[in-house]
Image: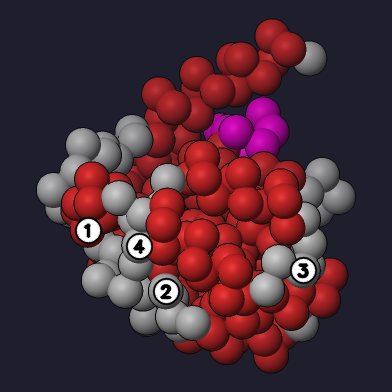
Amino acid sequence: MTFDDVMKELETMGTEQNRKVYRRHGVGENMFGVSYANLGALKKRIKRDQALAQALWASGNHDARVLATMVADPAQLGEAELETWAGDLDCYVLVDNFVGMAFRSPAARACMERWIRSDDEWIGRAGWNMLGQFAMHDPVLPDEFFTPYLHEIEVDIHTRKNRIRAAMNNTLIAIGIRSMHLEALAVAAAQRIGRVFVDHGETGCKTPEAIPYIRKARLRKTVKT
């Protein structure tokens, strides 16, 4: 499929109802309002197409950029391109889709270590979300890799920007679920942190409470193993 073909399809798939929902989640007006079901169907037809992904991202359209994260080839995404894309992030919805792609890049860890230091709300969120991905999906890293980040979350979470706070809380949970050792450390950190306040705007989203979430997930993980 060509770039023009895809953009035309995206435009026809958009609905005003989806646009209303996406606006409530912070998506700007450069969007068609395409459902994730339709984006997933397009992804299956396109499969991997890095050149198309680059063109879709460059369009600036929200739906096109989400699709770009689905059809990009992470193996071809180096640090420079990831940094460029990260600089375009403009809402938490796009951040979360971007991270799902960027985590699979060979440059993921190097970018994550820079992004968590960023005061930009979207780049900072991307960095902490990326760390959460490592906690959940990288079995090679030792538990000791994550312990300094628990301390950093504990010290800084209440002073960081809104959507970074949310990402740090989610990452605290992800680290706590990783192992029995990290569960104890994460729960202790969460007790000292207390309640984390995140403004979710005009949505029904809620900030998960770290301690019960970790303990429930660890219990399920123990039962499975």
- CB atoms at circles 4 and 3 under 8 Å apart? no
Q: Amino acid at mark 1?
A: Arg
Nearer to us in this view, 150 or 209 = 209
Q: Which residues are magenta?
A: 177-184
- CB atoms at circles 1 and 2 under 8 Å apart? no
How many residues crowd mark 2 within 10 Å: few (<14), some (14–19), many (20+)? Answer: some
> Which residue occupies 71% across, 47% down?
44
The label shown at residue 49 is: 3
Dividing the picture into quarters, in which one does residue 217 lie?
Answer: top right
Res 139 seen here = yes
Q: Amino acid at mark 4?
A: Phe
Q: Nearer the viewer, mark 1 or mark 2?
A: 2
Mark 1, residue position? 23
- Locate residue 27 relative to residue 143 in the image: left or right: left
Which residue reaches farthest top?
Answer: 223
How many residues crowd mark 1 within 10 Å: few (<14), some (14–19), many (20+)? Answer: some
Q: Earlier in the sequence, mark 4 or mark 1?
A: 1
- Locate residue 68 relative to residue 36 in the image: left or right: right
**Residue at disc 1, secondary structure:** helix
- CB atoms at circles 1 and 3 under 8 Å apart? no
Measure how far apart labels 1 and 3 are at the Cα level.
Answer: 29 Å
Q: Earlier in the sequence, mark 4 or mark 3?
A: 4
Mark 4, residue position? 32
Dividing the picture into quarters, in which one does residue 208 lie?
Answer: top left
Q: Nearer the viewer, mark 1 or mark 3?
A: 3
Q: Amino acid at mark 3?
A: Asp
- The rendered magenta stretch, by its main secondary structure, is classed as helix
Q: Position of residue 225 (x, y in %)?
A: 78, 14
Q: Earlier in the sequence, mark 1 or mark 3?
A: 1
- CB atoms at circles 4 and 1 under 8 Å apart? no
Asked if 191 appears above or below 79 in the picture, the reply is: above
The label shown at residue 61 is: 2
